Image: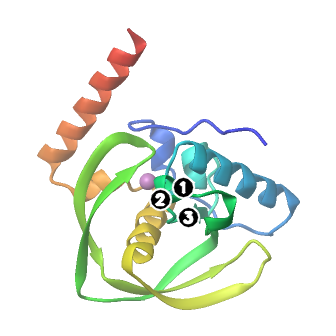
Amino acid sequence: MPLLPIIEAPDPRLRVISKPVESVDDDLRKLIADMFETMYAAPGIGLAAIQVGAPKRLLVIDLQEPEEEGGEGVRDPRVFINPEIVEASEELRTYQEGCLSVPDQYADIARADWIVARWIDEKGEAHEQRIDGLLATCLQHEMDHLEGILFIDHLSRLKRDMVLKKLEKAKRLKAA
Ligand code: NI
């Protein structure tokens, strides 16, 4: 399984609104497997299909922190296809977020403390579940990607521009 290149801001492809997945077939499962491999290698805890250039409403999450991993057995892969938020708490929870498409940049973002989400898994089975904690934060972050939204879009324009400038500078240094 190949590692997929991760698209980085400010690439306009990250602004595309992803389309619903029509069928959960072998091609999709192959993409899911490649996304997990890419996410684990990065390493990261969440990845939306659009971040690897596939504008599909699909995302993968594994909250198992890489440094805590003792091996494959402790992994906790979760697949969300066509996810929707049915209900969201008014209480907010702030978490320091990062994103594989905005490398090495972190910011405190406030999101709903809990959500009720509906989605389809990699077997094509439908789920509806109340989700809280880090998974709620992560799922909302990844679902933003499906709408072409990055976590830095929740910051003030000044802060967002600062992050984008830092990214640009890091890219120049890497290229030099
Ligand atoms: Ni992200």
Tag of residue 24:
none
Q: Earlier in the sequence, mark 2 or mark 1?
A: 1
Q: Secondary structure at mark 3?
A: loop
The residue to which callout 1 is attached is 47
The reply, left or right, for residue 133 in relation to residue 94 is: right
Of all residues, the one furthest to the top in this rendering is 176
Q: Residue at x 85, y 65 (%)?
A: 25
Type of the residue with mark 1? Leu
Q: Earlier in the sequence, mark 3 or mark 1?
A: 1
Which image quadrant: the C terminus? top left
Query: Quadrant for ligand 1?
Result: bottom left
User: How many residues crowd around disc 3 within 10 Å: few (fewer than 14), some, or many (20 or more)?
Assistant: many
- Mark 3 or 1, which is nearer the eye? 3
Position above or below: 100 against 170: below
Of all residues, the one furthest to the front in this rendering is 70
Percent across and percent down for residue 114 are 37, 85
Q: Residue at x 29, y 73 (%)?
A: 111
Q: Is mark 1 within 8 Å of ligand 1?
A: yes
The reply, left or right, for residue 93 in relation to residue 139 is: left
Alpha-carbon span between mark 2 and mark 1: 14 Å
Quadrant of res 2: top right
Q: Secondary structure at mark 2?
A: loop
Position above or below: 121 against 2: below
The residue to which callout 2 is attached is 65
Type of the residue with mark 2? Glu
Alpha-carbon span between mark 3 and mark 2: 8 Å
Alpha-carbon span between mark 3 and mark 1: 9 Å
Q: Residue at x 27, y 23 (%)?
A: 169
The residue to which callout 3 is attached is 62
